[in-house]
Image (cartoon, rainbow, N blue to C red):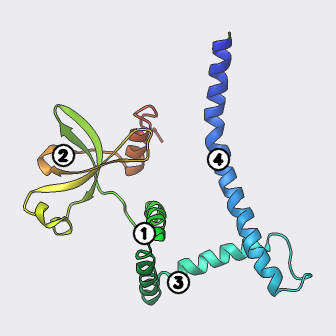
Amino acid sequence: MLKSISKILITGFITLLPVVLTIYLIYWLAISSEQVMGNALKLLLPNAAYFPGMGMIAGLIVVFIVGLMMNAYMVRQLFALGEQLLYRLPLIKTVYRAFRDFFDFFSPKKEQFGQVVAVSVNDMELVGFVTQEDPMRLPESFRDRDSVLVYLPMSYMVGGYTVLIPRSDLRPLKMSMEEAMRFVLTAGITGKNET
């Protein structure tokens, strides 16, 4: 009896946790933007003109304008120069680069991974993602081989291996990047969604 109750509680916890964390993240972003932008607006506007929620709206407008400006070549070049300065500062470069790489992963402009493939290793197959097929973008000592760079993610972890694999050891899979990533990160427990 106690075992079935704990199983039900764990199932409920696993079901609710992603929903609660997602809602909390959105709530935290909304509250933070309201506090920061709201305080700035209170300094600029008379008290009668300010209303609750105005800071959040202003935050969304600022984010939209920055996103719009990043489409301009000149702004991108200036931003790149600023980033090069950050990459030279001892402690900041490590933290900033880690955050930058993490958020670049979710960038809508970048296709992070190419083809989903099965990599043959000692009669086993690992699910991986081709990250670099162009030999000219590989280190010089790797360019003479007919190989591609493949990322092999690890289950239940943020991590994985980037390996140089001969094309002959790869087999393309009919899976989207999202399906394959979900499949690998959950160790195949989720299976393939039929949608």
Q: Can you identify the residue that label 3 sits on?
A: 69
Q: Residues within 10 Å of mark 2 (few under 14, many from 20)?
A: many
Instruction: Read off the residue under disc 4.
Output: 21
- In this rendering, which labeled residue sits more in front, label 4 or label 2? 4
Q: Earlier in the sequence, mark 4 or mark 2?
A: 4
**Looking at the picture, which amino acid does disc 2 mark?**
Leu
**Lower sequence index among marks 3 and 4:** 4
Q: Position of residue 62 (x, y in %)?
A: 64, 78
Task: Tell me: 106 left or right of 66.
Answer: left
Instruction: State the residue position of label 2.
Output: 170
Q: Residue furthest bottom?
A: 74
- In the image, which is nearer the foreground, mark 3 or mark 4? 4
CA–CA distance between discs 2 and 1?
A: 27 Å
* On screen, residue 64 above or below 112: below
Check contact, mark 1 vs mark 4: CB within 8 A: no
Which mark sits nearer the N-terminus, 1 or 4?
Answer: 4
Residue lying furthest right: 48
Q: Which residue is mark 1?
A: 109
Q: Quadrant of residue 37?
A: bottom right
State the mark number for residue 2. none
Disc 1 residue type? Lys
Indicate which disc, 3 or 1, sits on the residue closer to the N terminus: 3
Separation (CA) of disc 3 from disc 1: 15 Å
The kind of residue on which mark 3 rests is Met
At x 88%, y 82%, the residue is 49
Residue at image position (92%, 82%) is 48
